[in-house]
């Protein structure tokens, strides 16, 4: 089975602009011995859905491979930025509650 990992699990996103859409990259890896499919990426705090698999399906990651995913983040207050994201997939280490990662950075005006 696939085993999902976000590399690094706490990703430094640097400086983000206040009230603007900022592109943030996360790296997902499959440490398992079979492909895995990512179906959803959502913010726990703001409940923003960054990715939802549509009719075309999810993002498949082959065993031993990595995938860079772009998220559109729009912070609404200046200062420290800390966002927990849940990544849902069919990986062995996702038992229906998602795999959690953390985005951290600074929001500037």
Image (spheres, rainbow, N blue to C red):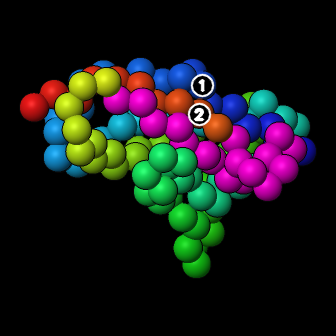
- In the rendered image, residue 91, in percent from the top left (x then y), is placed at 80, 47
Q: Are marks 2 and 1 in contact (CB under 8 Å)?
A: yes
Q: Secondary structure at mark 1?
A: loop
Q: Is residue 51 visible?
A: yes
Residue 55's place in the image compared with 97, above or below, is below
Compare marks 2 and 1 and give the one earlier in the sequence.
Answer: 1
Seen from the viewer's position, the closer of residues 52 and 58 is 52
55 horizontally vs 35: left or right: left
Name the quadrant of the N terminus: top right
Magenta-colored stretch includes residue 90: yes
Picture residue at 54% right of the left edge, 64% below the top:
52
Q: Which residues are magenta?
A: 81-99
- In the rendered image, residue 69, in percent from the top left (x then y), is placed at 48, 43
Q: Residue furthest left?
A: 109
Q: Which residue is mark 1?
A: 9
42 horizontally vs 72: left or right: right
43 horizontally vs 7: left or right: left
Picture residue at 27% right of the left edge, 42% below the top:
75
Residue 16's place in the image compared with 21, above or below, is above
Name the quadrant of the C terminus: top left
Residue 22 placement: quadrant: top left
User: Number of labelled discs?
Assistant: 2
Q: Secondary structure at mark 2?
A: strand
Q: Which residue is mark 2?
A: 101
Magenta-colored stretch includes residue 24: no
Which numbered tag is attached to residue 71? none
- In the rendered image, residue 71, in percent from the top left (x then y), is placed at 40, 46
Picture residue at 84% right of the left edge, 50% below the top:
95
Picture residue at 79% right of the left edge, 55% below the top:
96
- In the rendered image, residue 44, in percent from the top left (x then y), is placed at 54, 48
């Amino acid at each position: 089975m696939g085993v999902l990992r976000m590399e690094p699990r706490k990703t430094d996103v640097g400086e983000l602009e206040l009230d603007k859409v900022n592109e943030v990259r996360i790296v997902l890896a499959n440490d398992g011995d079979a492909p895995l499919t990512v179906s959803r990426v959502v913010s726990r705090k703001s409940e923003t859905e960054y990715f939802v698999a549509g009719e075309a399906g999810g993002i498949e990651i082959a065993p031993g491979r990595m995938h860079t995913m772009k998220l559109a983040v729009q912070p609404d207050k200046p200062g420290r930025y800390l966002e927990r994201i849940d990544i849902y997939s069919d990986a062995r280490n996702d038992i229906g509650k998602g795999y959690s990662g953390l985005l951290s950075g600074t929001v500037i005006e």
